[in-house]
């Protein structure tokens, strides 16, 4: 099997390396024009990695796209994302095959941007983009940290930390923008933004937009600019029209269509996931009087009575509440235990009647085994 694998790889590797060698100068020149001096290398996957992939691909070599891959090494994290955008302008990305291990490192600390693009001749090319520090760590592990500190390159680590905690700055900006405003939706929105998995989608120009998993085109539009969000009339994902409720996936290319007279509507809140989008939508709806004020929760008593089932039981309950002068607003029956069903009553509390009196009156009913009273808000 080892010899077979080695023979199969040899010819494919030679063809792949020749192809990458031909496109390397094109890529170098393109990046240089945009002010990025990058080191570009190409390498073949290790035999063990190829073997593992073959096992997952039914031993079909044609299904392995990264037998040979390009690695772009740049100076800092900002250049990583800039290089990714430039790359996608030159060669179209393969939808759904972009991974950001910089914003979301692997559990072993590995960081890099991964993408597949359609290169010259429509051939699929696997590309990794990373900083020098990330490349050293990927090659040499944690020892790379000691090397950089010894060499006095703490600035690299600082830059990486700044990128990792970029969401803190986003939170600060959001707080400044919404200072003194209604924050009813804030907490749940922030939980969605900063503690769920992230996706990375692209503008038609190839710029990367970072959104929470489950985000919609509405979230994308407001992330680009509030005016684009407010005037959004439609959206295209990978050149296909989609609904406002469409869930975006990493690698999607998103185009927002706008109209001058278009304005947000209340149903947009059903599809918007990010605090930025929800904040702008709620602000507009509130200004136009289209946002319903939050309902004030009413204090209620919930009484749960467990009793042996019999004919006339509900009649006895009704008589007790009538004598106490209590108007029942809601009744539910829990029949999980058919012999001893639970009846749940809800009603506003009365100052003239304490809970002890309700408890005593209900326990006098034949067959009642347990009574639980608690305060709730609804």
Image (cartoon, grey):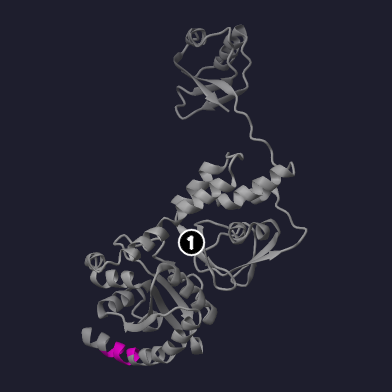
In the rendered image, is residue 123 in sight? Answer: no
List x then y, in percent, for residue 4.
25, 87
Taken as a whole, is the magenta stretch helix, strand or loop? helix
List x then y, in percent, for residue 111.
35, 66
**220, 10: nearer the viewer:** 220
Q: Tell me: residue 21, above or below residue 258.
A: below
In the rendered image, which quarter contains the C terminus?
Answer: top right
In the rendered image, is residue 80 in sight? Answer: yes
Which residue is rendered at x = 34% and y = 64% of the image? 155
List x then y, in percent, for residue 257.
69, 65
- Secondary structure under badge 1? strand
- Residue annotated with mark 1: 199
Q: Magenta region: which residues?
A: 7-13
List x then y, in percent, for residue 90.
53, 82
In the rendered image, which quarter contains the N terminus?
Answer: bottom left
Q: Residue furthest right?
A: 261
Q: Decide if residue 279 is on the left or right side of residue 171.
A: right
Q: Tell me: residue 304, above or below residue 189.
A: above
């Amino acid at each position: 099997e080892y010899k077979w694998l080695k023979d199969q790889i040899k010819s494919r590797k030679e063809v792949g390396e020749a192809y990458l060698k031909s496109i390397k100068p094109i890529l170098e020149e393109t990046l240089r024009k945009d002010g990025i001096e990058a080191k570009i290398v190409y390498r073949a996957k290790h035999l063990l990695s190829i073997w593992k992939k073959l096992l997952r691909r039914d031993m079909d070599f044609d299904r392995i796209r990264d037998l040979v891959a390009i690695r772009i090494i740049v100076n800092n994290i900002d250049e990583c994302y800039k290089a990714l955008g430039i790359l996608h302008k030159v060669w179209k990305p393969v939808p759904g095959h972009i991974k950001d291990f910089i914003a979301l490192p692997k559990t072993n600390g590995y960081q890099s941007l991964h993408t597949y693009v359609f290169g010259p001749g429509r051939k699929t090319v696997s590309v990794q983009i990373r900083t020098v520090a990330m490349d050293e760590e990927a090659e040499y592990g944690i020892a790379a940290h000691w090397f950089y500190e010894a060499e006095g390159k703490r600035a690299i680590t600082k830059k990486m930390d700044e990128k990792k905690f970029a969401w803190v700055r986003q939170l600060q900006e959001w707080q400044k923008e919404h200072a003194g405003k209604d924050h009813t939706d804030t907490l749940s929105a922030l939980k969605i933004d900063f503690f769920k998995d992230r996706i990375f989608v692209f503008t038609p120009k190839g710029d990367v937009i970072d959104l929470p998993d489950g985000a919609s085109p509405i979230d994308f539009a407001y992330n680009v600019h509030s005016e684009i969000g407010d005037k959004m009339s439609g959206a295209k994902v990978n050149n296909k029209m989609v609904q406002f409720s469409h869930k975006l996936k990493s690698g999607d290319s998103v185009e927002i269509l706008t109209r001058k007279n278009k304005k947000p509507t209340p149903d947009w809140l059903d599809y918007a996931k990010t605090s930025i989008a929800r904040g702008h939508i709620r602000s507009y709806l509130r200004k136009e009087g289209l946002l319903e004020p939050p309902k004030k929760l009413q204090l209620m008593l919930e009484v749960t009575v467990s009793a042996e089932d019999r004919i006339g039981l509900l009649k006895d309950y009704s008589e007790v509440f009538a004598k106490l002068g209590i108007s029942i607003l809601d009744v539910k029956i829990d029949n999980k235990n058919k012999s001893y069903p639970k009846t749940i009553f809800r009603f506003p509390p009365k100052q003239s009647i304490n809970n002890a009196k309700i408890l005593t009156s209900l326990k006098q009913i034949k067959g009642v085994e347990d009574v639980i009273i608690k305060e709730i808000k609804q």
